[in-house]
Structures are given as structure tokens and as C-alpha cells.
Amino acid sequence: MPEPNPLSSAIPVDTLIHNIGQLVTIAQTPLHNATGPLQVIEHAALTLHNGLITWIGDGSEQFIHALAQHTTLHLVDAQEAVITPGLVDSHTHLVFAGDRSEEFHLRRAGVSYGTLLAEGRGILTTMKATRAASNETLLTLAQQRLQRMRHSGTTTVEIKTGYGLHTTSEENCLRLINQLNALENLHTQHRIRIVPTFLGAHSIPPEYRERRTEYVDLLTTEMLPAFVGLARFCDVFCEREAFTLDESRRILTRAKELGYALKLHADQLSPSGGARLAAELGATSADHLDYTSDDDLHAMRQAGVVATLLPGCSYSLRSPYPSARRFIDAGLSVALATDFNPGTSYCENMQMMLELAMSAMGMSLEEALTAATINGARALALHEQIGSIEVGKRAELAFWSIKDYHEIGYHFGVNLIHNIFVG
Ligand code: NIG
Ligand code: FE
């Protein structure tokens, strides 16, 4: 029996993307005409209906010509581009004011990130600048950053709060993140999907320095209940210089009760126990993981926690890169994200993360692309909707101006993205 196609059957179609040089589907279910672990189809075409993929297949001219007879069809000529799922950046701190170039260069001279944090610089420097900035400034800065992300191939980005650190400024930041998402809708085919995360537990603000328990109380009794519906995830920076394991447990347990999904900044600067806690509480992801033990990786695997690696931090802090092999061999789903923030990773570009993952963390191209797409979607619990190119999923695509996807990582330090497309 011939494969059903939009000509012969009742497959709904309103858009046809044709003339695709290579379609790198990263499909999670086998496709009949694809090859390799990423499932690559040469000379492909795909159809959409209401933004969902309805058919993937043969891009032969004859067939496309017949299909294009549909008068209402919106045609998109991919001009032989390589198409992958849009890149999913599942960990960023995108809303803030000011910069920390001074600290970046102090670190080149040997001062550690932890020392700066303990001295009340680092995150708190950015907190001051963010609290002092107008909403207009914060919004403009955030939109400029989103624009850079769009140009680098990102179609979904998670954004954390965490530079307000009191109820009104954290709420303001969450509302800005939601507003950014609404503004993105105006971009129609180039919109970025935004996932909001509440990270009020990023650092103890100076006014609570001597009474930290009260800040944890404020988080659990005031902020978390008030922000239900504004944030999808709750995250905690579980670290010596930030929140202890017990404080993190308290905050995240309360968040879970209120219906937030959970994330953790875990074991970034020391073996803080964050990864173990992520497993204990059934977090969606644990991120950083520079100091996580094998036992804790095992616990994460048992609990189905996604391991998110952030090579931009190793680059920026000049700390050793975690070996991705260790995580993959432990059976974990590994995601890659930028961790875009003014302190540890001032980079909007997911292509750079792919490059670092391949050059410094031992990932193959196939693993890195999987980590930057479907596993990023897993880290946001969106893998049923996005992250791979499959019938039934949303068409959120990256168009690469290359002939073959093997150029990714090989041709580095330049932008290989032509555009993003969101159906
Ligand atoms: O993911 N470590 C905590 N948070 C960020 C850094 C934020 C900052 O330094 O401003 C991170 O690395
Ligand atoms: Fe972070």
C-alpha cells in the first residue's frame, strides 16, 4: 500500500515547506525513509496544518507541483536549507540590567566566582542594577537578547527571574517575562516560545543577610503562592554561597505542593547534594552538575531527571568542562542550554553550546543536536509538543544555511542559521 500523502488522502494541509536539502528530524519514532540516529531525510518536504506537522516525505518536484495546485496552500521554499527542530534553550536568566564585565576580567586575573559572590558582588551586583532599572529598559534589553537568540536558531527559551529578590521586583520580573511571551506572538512565523521560571531563591538579598530564614519564609509563604500561574517552574540555586540543601528542600517542597514543576541549580561549585534532592523531589531537570557523584547521577536516572549541561559556564569561569560521556553512559537524558546570564555565561547563542559540547565535553554531533532539541524540550516537559520533527508535533524549525548537517560544530564561530520558522 502506498504511504498516505496529502494528495491521496484526507491529511489536512495549509502550508507546504518544500525544497529542503536535508531534514534532520531527531524523530523519536522510526521513519520509513530516514537514515541514521538523527533520522535524516534528503530532499524532503513537509506539510502543516494550524502549526502542526501533518506529513513528512518526498520532496520530488512532480509531487510538489501537484500539491501546490491547492489554491489556499501557503508555500515556503526552503532553498535547499538543512532543517532541524528549532533549538531549545532550557536554562537562561534573560531579564536583567547592567553588566559584569569588570568581574569577568577580575576572574581572568584569578579571583573566583564564589569569592565574588561571598563578597556580595556577582548576582547581587545584577540585582541592584535590575531593581534600579525601569520596565522599559528591562523589556528593551530582553527583546534585544531574544532577537539574538532568534538569529541563532532558538525557538524556545526558558527564562528565570532571580535578580529582583523581593516580592514586588520578582513579581515585576515574572510579569515582564509573560509580557515578552505575548509580544513574541506578534512575530507570527518567527516567534520564540517563552517558558517562565521563578528563581526567587537565587541568592539571599542583602536586607535578609542576617536573617536568612525569614527570606525562605517569604519565599514559601508569600511569593510562591502569589506567583502560581505566572511561572511554570520553580528553581533554586542550591549551593554553599546561596541556599543550603535543607532550605532548598523546603522551598521546592512548597513549590511542588502548589503545582510548580521543579528545577535546580545543582552541584555547580561544590558537591551540594542538589542533584540528589532533584531526584528525591522528582524535579524535571537538574542543571550544571559539575560536582555530582556517580551515585547521585544514578538517583537522577531512576527518577527520570534530565541532566542539563551548561558549557558556557565552564568557558566563562574557566572551570573544567563536565564530561558529557559520564552522563550519557549513566543513561541520563542530557540537555544543553546557554545559561545566558551576566555572570557565568553571557552568550545567547546555542550554536556556541553545540560547538563547546563537541569540542570540550566529548559529545558527538548526534548527541549534541539531540541535547539541544528534544532533550531541551524534555527539560521543559514539552517533549510531546516540540523538540523533534514528527507528525503531530508543532512546526518549530531552524533553517541552516549549510548543505549538510555535518558542518555543524565543524564550521565554528560563525552563524550558520538562516532563520527560524514557527508554524
Ligand atoms: O546559572 N549560579 C547561579 N546562577 C547563574 C549565575 C547568575 C549570575 O552570576 O548572575 C548560573 O550560573
Ligand atoms: Fe543558571
Image (tube, rainbow, N blue to C red):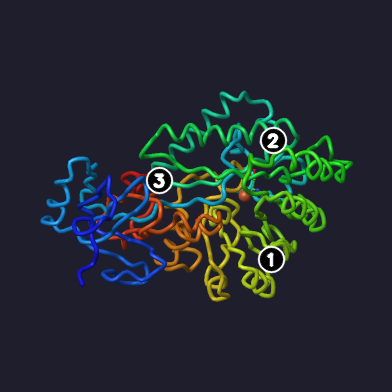
Q: Residue furthest front?
A: 10
Reading the image, the residue beneath label 3 is: 152
Q: Residue at x 22, y 43 (%)?
A: 73
Q: Secondary structure at mark 2?
A: helix
Tell me the kind of residue under disc 1. Answer: Ala
Q: Residue at x 79, y 58 (%)?
A: 245
Question: In 3D space, how far apart are the residues under numbered discs 3 and 1 (Cα atoms)?
Answer: 32 Å
Question: In 3D space, how far apart are the residues under numbered discs 2 and 1 (Cα atoms)?
Answer: 27 Å
Q: Secondary structure at mark 1?
A: helix
**Ligand 1 within 8 angstroms of badge 2 C-beta:** no
For marks 2 and 1, the one nearer the N-term is 2
Q: Nearer the viewer, residue 224 or 248?
A: 224
Q: Position of residue 71 (x, y in %)?
A: 17, 41
* Circle 3 crowding by C-alpha within 10 Å: few under 14, some 14–19, many from 20: many
Q: Position of residue 268 (x, y in %)?
A: 67, 58
For marks 3 and 1, the one nearer the N-term is 3
Q: Residue furthest right?
A: 211
In the picture, the disc for residue 294 is: none
Tell me the kind of residue under disc 2. Answer: Glu
Reading the image, the residue beneath label 2 is: 170
